[in-house]
Image: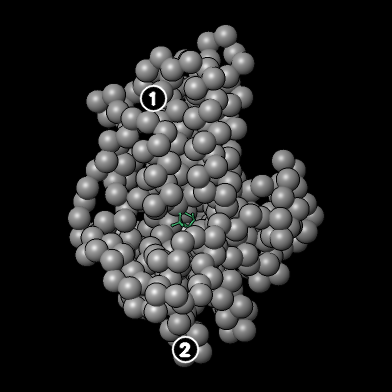
Amino acid sequence: MKTLIARSLKFEAGVVKVLDQYLLPHQQVWHECRDVATMSDLILTLKVRGAPLIGLAASLLVAYLSEQGEDKVTIAHAINTLEATRPTAVNLMHAMAKLRSVLDKPDWQTQLVTTAEQLFEEDAALCDRMATIGATLVNAGDNILTHCNTGALATAGVGTALGVIHHAAKQHRNIHVWVDETRPLLQGGRLTAFELQAWQIPYTLICDNMAASLMAAGKVDKIFVGADRIAANGDVANKVGTYNLAVLAHFHQIPFYVVAPVTTVDSRCLSGEQIPIEQRERAEVTGVSGSFGHCQWAPDNAEIYNPAFDVTPASLITGWVLDTGLYSASDVESGIFSLG
Ligand code: MRU
């Protein structure tokens, strides 16, 4: 396989390497990955995270195993295991389905490698197209609010929602970003703040529960978020807390945009109710972990509820920015996401 380099994922010197997103921003540690158990663990523990990146990392590992001479049964098993690591982000299922579809070809080993390479290289191009389209929605001086992390760390390119902000900030110097911390795993506070700082884009970090008062004070002009799965009716699953923002944006009449590659659309999923929502472990809610270790603040036996994602109904979304274009509610109602 050729050398492939992105911000948090590489295929280099014959091995898959991932930047540990759990330890960012205070430690930059790269892990080498040579087997399914290691990659599954990296994905499950969110060291590798973000809908597009999960699919790409899993694909590179499958291609690596093929190059190592693993047989077809082992590869098929690897694809199934990796696909089952996280249930909500459909990009992972999309990538694994593409790899599975070449297993019947006579030259399947070569095709696994070229398919993984293509998925990786295409992702950067998809990001550029979304960023270019989305940036046309941004005006000079806009205060943009975003949730979770959707930047270069989460993709093989510049990102989805954060890619839009990156491109807009290049065009207009006075863009400012409100960054939700994104409880419980703090992807905003740890990762989005880190990326905006590196890009020298002015930002202010807020706790998630501060968004309402900011909107009421007229300090948010637009909201851009990513997506883990878009249903045929336009409902969007994204990091938990996205729905809160959409409700608030609707009340305060603030435009709310979702940015995602077309591979995030799942036309077989008719509505958000059919999107499987990942439930995660209690320690994420009872405390916080990172490069500093773990700190628990809740009582040992506290009951917890920890869905990693929520579903924002299409009725609260102003526009869907895909690499193929900007879609409105009427486009979605006319079945643009049902085409498969
Ligand atoms: O649990 P995570 O950190 O993988 O969740 C990530 C998100 O919800 C992102 O908004 C989404 O994957 C889009 S990333 C370009």
In which quadrant of the rendered image does the C terminus lie?
Answer: top right
Q: Is residue 68 above or below residue 134?
A: above
Image coordinates for residue 75, horizontal then vertical, percent = 50, 23
Label 1 residue SS = helix
Q: Nearer the viewer, residue 336 or 189?
A: 189
Picture quadrant where residue 289 is located: bottom left
Residue wearing tag 1: 64
Relative to 241, is 171 on the left or the right? left
Image coordinates for residue 268, horizontal then vertical, percent = 73, 45
Picture quadrant where residue 319 is located: bottom right
Who's the residue at 34% across and 23% down the image? Answer: 2
Image coordinates for residue 49, horizontal then vertical, percent = 42, 51
Badge number at residue 306: none
At label 2, the amino acid type is Ser
Residues under labels 1 and 2: Cα distance? Answer: 49 Å
Who's the residue at 46% across and 77% down the image? Answer: 302
Q: Earlier in the sequence, mark 1 or mark 2?
A: 1
Name the front one of labels 1 and 2. 1
Q: Is residue 229 above or below residue 62?
A: below
Residue wearing tag 2: 213
Q: Nearer the viewer, residue 281 or 145?
A: 281
Q: Is residue 213 above or below residue 47?
A: below
Who's the residue at 59% across and 13% down the image? Answer: 105
Image coordinates for residue 45, horizontal then vertical, percent = 39, 52
| Residue 32 appears anywhere in the view | yes
Picture quadrant where residue 238 is located: bottom right
